[in-house]
Image (spheres, rainbow, N blue to C red):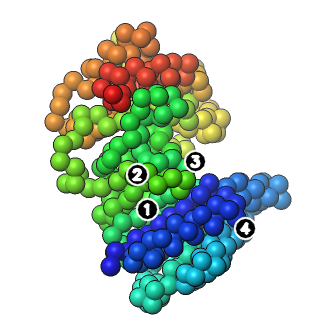
Amino acid sequence: MTRVVKKFGGTSVADLERIRSVAARVKHAHDAGEEVVVVVSAMAGVTNQLVDYCVKMAPLHDAREYDTIVATGEQVTAGLTAIALQELGVPARSWLGWQIQLHTDSAHGKARISGIDREALDQRLRQGEVPVIAGFQGIGSDNRLTTLGRGGSDTTAVAIAAALQADRCDIYTDVDGVYTTDPRIVSRARKLEKITFEEMLEMASVGAKVLQTRAVELAMKYGVRMQVLSSFDDSPGTFVVGEDEILEHELVSGVTYSRDEAKITLLRVADRPGIAAGIFGPLADASINVDMIVQNISAEGDTTDITFTVSKSDLERARAVIEASRETITYARLLSDPNVVKVSVIGVGMRSHAGIASKMFHTLAEKGINIQVISTSEIKVSVLIDEAYTELAVRALHTAYRLDAH
């Protein structure tokens, strides 16, 4: 018997009618003989409202109470979905994170999963019942309710699929799969039939909003086959799988972009051992993630310019941290620019083919687009460009790598 975890995001359960539609979809799978576990997010907009309540009550609120409040969104959806299934004659029961014993650490607001007790769920599945689980939440080592961070319901679903050794984990959302790029920018973008975990992880980390990064990491670690598909139609989705399931790798699988970038440049930094640690250490201590880094040493060799990127939301905090460390860092000027975008080309085919980066640079040069920063990995090349050129760059690269639908 096929065992499937089906996760439904906020837009899929946005109102009672959509919850009924989700229940009908689950009933169809249940009637077909599948063992189905359902994981639900909060109804669209509910989590934002709950977070807003916390902030308005106290900007520096207790993270433990924040978790207690924001986790209620998924609790409501789980109960309503179970009722909708019962109304269709499907035996169903809602479960909260503490009830299935989804154990996490005690990092409230961004907890990480440490284990799941599968025995009770296994028993219910064998009895033909559909467990409807509230995503995004667990129970911490301090025995208090925890949440997994925004988008955490994807992570819940994959973790449960791994624990129950499910055949696959279906992620239902408002898009019908993973595309070669954003279809809103490139009308000839193609939906991919399959994509590797590594490619999906790179896409998620550099701007694609289809799947949550931690969920993909977890799926790759435990070999959980994922499928991204739409709640609103029955078209086939995109499978996220191990590399061995894809016979012929595309040279480039996709072009992504991220507008959540800001650039910081420190001019004439003293070129001496420990200077990088003096800059990036305090940023790490302030939980500010640094992405792309480039260093230019002066002709004299005694100073250097260092450019790096942070998320836009961290820009002002990053500036403050660096300025507070000015005596130890020693630099002439600090420049910042929030009007940049990171554009990336991704594909496991890069491992065995040369010239991918060269084609990217030539394509952008032909369009008169200046590259400010470059970073690479084994299956990705990313560049930082002026935000005004985002759409032009994405379209040009999509065509250059022959990703356009014919």
Disc 4 to disc 3: CB gap under 8 Å: no
Mark 4 vs mark 1: in front: 1
Identify the residue under disc 1.
170
Residue drawn at (43%, 47%) of the image = 177
- Residue 129, label in figure: none
Identify the residue under disc 4.
69
Residue drawn at (65%, 35%) of the image = 316
- Give whichever of discs 3 and 2 has the lower sequence position: 2
Identify the residue under disc 2.
237
As rendered, which of 58 and 156 lies closer to the eye?
A: 156
Residue drawn at (18%, 43%) of the image = 248
Q: Amino acid at mark 2?
A: Gly
- Residue 286, label in figure: 3
- Give whichever of discs 2 and 1 has the lower sequence position: 1
Pick out the residue farthest to the right.
57
User: Number of callouts in the render?
Assistant: 4
Disc 2 to disc 1: CB gap under 8 Å: yes
Q: Is residue 359 left or right of residue 109?
A: left
- Give whichever of discs 4 and 1 has the lower sequence position: 4
